[in-house]
Image: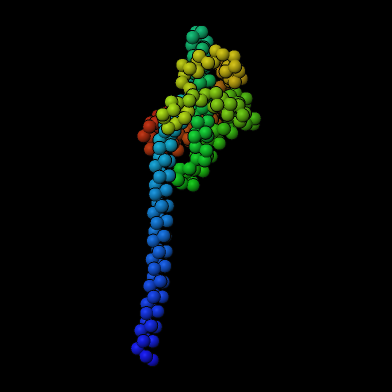
Amino acid sequence: MSTEIVVAVCAAIVSVVSAVLSVLAGTRVTQLQHRLAMQREEQARKLQLHDVMGRYRQPLLRSAVDLQSRFYNIVQNRFLQRYFFASESDREYATTSTLYVIAEYLGWVEVLRREVQYLDLGDLEANRRLSDLLEEITSWFLTDKVDDAFRLFRGEQRAIGEIMLVPRPADELARYESMGYAAFSHKLKGDEFAKWFARLTGDVERLANCEDVRQMRVLKLQHALIDLIDFLDPDCARVPATRRQKIP
């Protein structure tokens, strides 16, 4: 074989090898760029998730604490019997504040539903657990298999949550928050707003006149709310253990 042929063959081999190496290198670069892009997206998603949960975890937790605390006091400390008949101002407070803690919780659940269409905690198990806890509370509010006190159909829960929403300033990241107590007390004097709480108002009066306040719905709701609190604050960093006792 002549020298020219050998050189040509070698050149061809080198060219093919170079082309193959170039393709492999390009593929690796593309794969690396894809991995880096995925990592950046994952990091951005985690940062966004941290921001979202930071904004809503605390108010949802606080509203759950306030609601379970009222249920606990109704059963264990006979809150309604003590204050409903004490004076006109005490009766008004006992009724309005009980309606409010229910409405505030439903308001924050509605905020979550609107702001976080698909709750994603970055962990499938945690995501499922939070969804299950919220649904359990919803179910205990609506079920007709226990006593009627504080029963709310799913649509009523959504409606109360909706009318509790207050827009935040346009320059804030969160679009809504749940209404404060003073604004709620004022709006409750209006017929259009108050009609959503007519049945609950009757339930408050009925329980105030009831000797046995260990209503199954109240107990189950309080227990489910404690489970939600334990999930949102597992280390008792925000809510001490003394404020998360289940009704025995």
Which of 106 and 33 lies nearest the eye of the viewer?
A: 33
Residue at position x 41%, y 30% in the image: 172
Residue 158 rendering spot, x and y as whole percentages: 58, 29
Which of 48 and 19 lies nearest the eye of the viewer?
A: 19
Task: Answer with left or right where residue 179 lies relative to residue 195.
Answer: left
Residue 34 rendering spot, x and y as whole percentages: 42, 56
Residue 244 shows up from this direction? no
Residue 52 rendering spot, x and y as whole percentages: 43, 37
- In the image, residue 115 sits, relative to residue 2, either above or below, namely above
Can you tell which quarter of the image residue 20 is in?
Answer: bottom left
Residue at position x 51%, y 25% in the image: 165
Residue at position x 40%, y 64% in the image: 26
Outermost bottom residue: 1
Which of 215 and 195 lies nearest the eye of the viewer?
A: 195
Residue at position x 38%, y 35% in the image: 236
- In the image, residue 223 sits, relative to residue 201, either above or below, namely below
Which of 169 and 117 lies nearest the eye of the viewer?
A: 169
State which quarter of the image contains the N terminus. bottom left
Can you tell which quarter of the image residue 213 is in?
Answer: top right
Residue 180 shows up from this direction? yes
